[in-house]
Image (cartoon, helix red, strand yellow):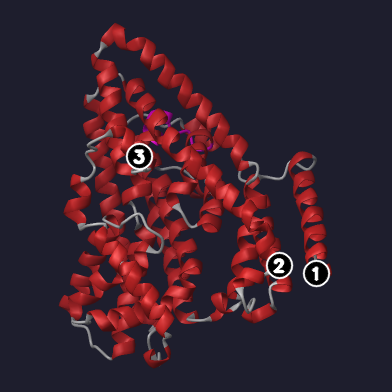
Amino acid sequence: MSLALIAYWLITIVLFGALFVLARNMKMKLWARVMIGFGLGGGMGFVFGGGAEGCAEAAVCIPASTQFIGEAFVRLIRMLIVPLIFLTLSAGVIAMGDPKKLGSLGGRTILLYFGTTILAASIGLIFGTIFRPGDGIDLTNVSTDAVDAVQGRMAEADAAGGLIDRFIAIIPENPIDALASTDVLAIIFWAVIFGVGILAAGDKGKPVAAVIESGSEAVLKVTHFVMEVAPYGVYALMAWVISTQGLDILINLGKLAIALYLACLLHMFITYGSIIKFIVRLPVIRFFGGIVDAQAVAFSTDSSNATLPVTISNVSENLGVKKSVAASVLPLGATINMDGTSIYLGIVALFASQALGIALTPADYAMVAITATLASIGAAGIPSAGLLLAATVLSVFGVTTEQSVLIVALIFPFDRLLDMMRTVTNVTGDAAVAVTVAKWEGALDEEVFKAKPVA
């Protein structure tokens, strides 16, 4: 065992102890501890991972020794996804008492998600036009390994089927298989049908309803337990990412990253902020303060599904959305609300057109916006799905498959950093829609929304 490895572990143990003290004695909020873990992990990954260029071989990186902590954290929160969606959504349907309410709630939810996604694609095109991230890009330097990796991922995405195929797959042939494979849309479908069945059973369904409702409360308590380890998991994840990829992940393709981050921030504060301010008529600062834990976890895990337990907890406990609505709207949003991806596809389309020297017409812009919207809603549940969908959007204005592979391969090594911001945007949009639908459905406790001051 090397002295550097011993030093790394000693420092890590001390830092973990400090995070524990901040949680127990100083009562520091979870989001603040998560962001501290994020920064400390990145710093340790840089110092012990070879500096700016990262480790020469990922397998021998010193921070790899704590990678299991990050993986364990991700597995813990993914462990909650299936029981959380099934139990809370079924309990939500039962709490409504009238299945007819589902039609109103579902229609309003989908309409809002679709509307914000169209706006997101348009914002992406605007920022891609302003920043021109593709100017001066040399595609001849793309490595063969990167091209091969992207081609494999694209084949995987194609195998997932088109938009219509995925809509048909919402109906599970076997609900148990859907639960086992974490097929979110199929689980949502089955949970709603099961909840309606319990209501239709009347008195005979009450014992099952009691079990479902008790299970829903229990899994939310488990969520709180799991989230207490978030700062340590985030620390380990960031140490691994920075040590293996170096600071290049933060500085390469700078204009593309800046354009995406600014576009996402604008969409969150202007689009979602306007929804909260002018439609829901509630304080915007309180809204963002209420979901900051979910945003922090989303940024570190880059997964809307993995963040779902925290999002439901934040929206119901901090923003006053009844669990029946939160459990219905948020799982659906984690699957179909991909505003961050829609923004990204718009920017990548402009990146490609500029790198390849293709001038776009107004009709091309319109088609890119529409295609980006539809493609993001039908995104497959695989890593970097947003980037891999780019080929569909680029084909709208004549980019060949070979050219698409080169574009995607150039961006792919740095996609995690970009995906983190896309996920924050998606999760924020889920919360905004949940609050809005709850307001319309009379399921929003405004006193709870306004009660807790923003720290």
Mark 1 belongs to which amino acid?
A: Ala
> Upstream in the sequence, badge 3 or badge 2?
2
Please state which of residues 242 and 251 is positioned toward the viewer in this rendering: 242
Q: Are the two marked residues, 3 and 2, in contact with CB atoms closer than 8 angstroms?
A: no
Q: Residue at x 44, y 33 (%)?
A: 83
Question: What is the CA distance from the residue labelled 3 to the residue labelled 2?
Answer: 42 Å
Q: Is residue 327 left or right of residue 22?
A: left
Q: Which residue is mark 1?
A: 4
Category of crowding for the residue at label 1, using alpha-carbon neighbours closer than 10 angstroms: few (below 14), some (14–19), many (at least 20): few
Above-or-below relation of 320 to 339 = above
| Magenta residues (range) | 318-326
Q: Which residue is mark 3?
A: 329
Please state which of residues 280 and 394 is positioned toward the viewer in this rendering: 394
Category of crowding for the residue at label 2, using alpha-carbon neighbours closer than 10 angstroms: few (below 14), some (14–19), many (at least 20): many
Q: Are the two marked residues, 3 and 1, in contact with CB atoms closer than 8 angstroms?
A: no
Q: Residue at x 19, y 71 (%)?
A: 366
State which quarter of the image contains the N terminus.
bottom right
Q: Determine the secondary structure under disc 3.
A: helix
Q: Is residue 108 left or right of residue 327?
A: left
> Upstream in the sequence, badge 3 or badge 1?
1
Please state which of residues 282 and 264 is positioned toward the viewer in this rendering: 264
Q: Residue at x 29, y 60 (%)?
A: 376
Query: In which quadrant of the rendered view does residue 96 lie?
Result: top left
Q: Are the two marked residues, 2 and 1, in contact with CB atoms closer than 8 angstroms?
A: yes
Q: Which residue is mark 2?
A: 62
